Amino acid sequence: MKVYAQLITDENTNIRFRKNTLLQFGDSNKLIGSAVLVNPGSAVPSTKDIVDLKFIKSFYEQNHNITIKDDTSLWHEYTVDSTMGQLEKIFNGWYLNVINEGVRKPKRELNGVIQLFNLFNVMNANQKSALIDYRLTQSIHNRFNESHLFSDKPVYLGWGNLGKWGLEDISKEIFKELIFKFNPQYDKIFGNNRFYHPGYINRSFSRNPNSKKLLLDFYSLLDK
């Protein structure tokens, strides 16, 4: 996995935002699907000075008909955090293979890009501190506004309880903009759904039947 994302610093507060995170697998620039979680965690910009802007530009042009400026100051390569690894296992069927076959390997190797979004974009592994910063800034980069990038691919909503009851003003807006034709795994009534964070999936997939069902329903969309 290679990780690319935009890094933006608010001039008034020095709060940093990570936006439009791309998880690249293999050499394809095809969009596999998207995920919306809570806020950027422990992944940090890599010490490398070079970012594959050519790949990023080709991804946005071919999947979204968007032209990315030829500017490497905004885009950075990032380290991989644990949540990204767990998200990979949701998309590649690793958890399902353990459940059904007892083997700890993916059902398939991913080749393409997973778009990773968050309810809010404050880059802080301490979620309580991140929420304080979120409420401090009025930056246009602060919260999610990228539902137009979902395209016709499946979306994994993993914002957990914070998105269901704490930041529901954001999550309900995202849910309303979801195209259910491409996401039939969700009940159209917001409160009837389980929005398990990948970290909870990682802890519960072998014992919670609801986690198993969520994994199966989502993976079946990717398998088409």
Image (cartoon, rainbow, N blue to C red):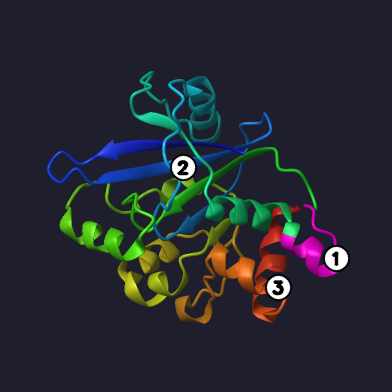
Stretch of the chain drawn in magenta: 95-106
Name the residue beneath numbered marker 1: 102
* Label 3 Cα neighbours within 10 Å, binned few <14 / some 14-19 / many ≥20: some
Farthest-out residue, right:
101
Locate residue 54, reporting x and y percent: 51, 20
Task: Give, as a three-letter code, the residue at label 2.
Answer: Thr
How much space separates mark 2 and mark 1, taking CA atoms? 32 Å
Name the residue beneath numbered marker 3: 212
Residue drawn at the location 24% of the way across and 58% of the way down:
134
In contact (CB < 8 Å): disc 1 and disc 3: no
Name the residue beneath numbered marker 2: 21
Tell me where residue 200 sits by quadrant.
bottom right
Tell me where residue 129 sits by quadrant.
bottom left
In contact (CB < 8 Å): disc 2 and disc 1: no
Q: Is residue 46 above or below residue 16?
A: above
Q: Is residue 95 above or below residue 1?
A: below
Q: Mark 2 or mark 1, which has the lower sequence index?
A: 2
Check if residue 102 falls in the magenta segment: yes
Taking the image as shown, residue 6 lies to the left or right of residue 196, namely left
Locate residue 115, reporting x and y percent: 52, 45
Residue drawn at the location 19% of the way across and 43% of the way down:
14
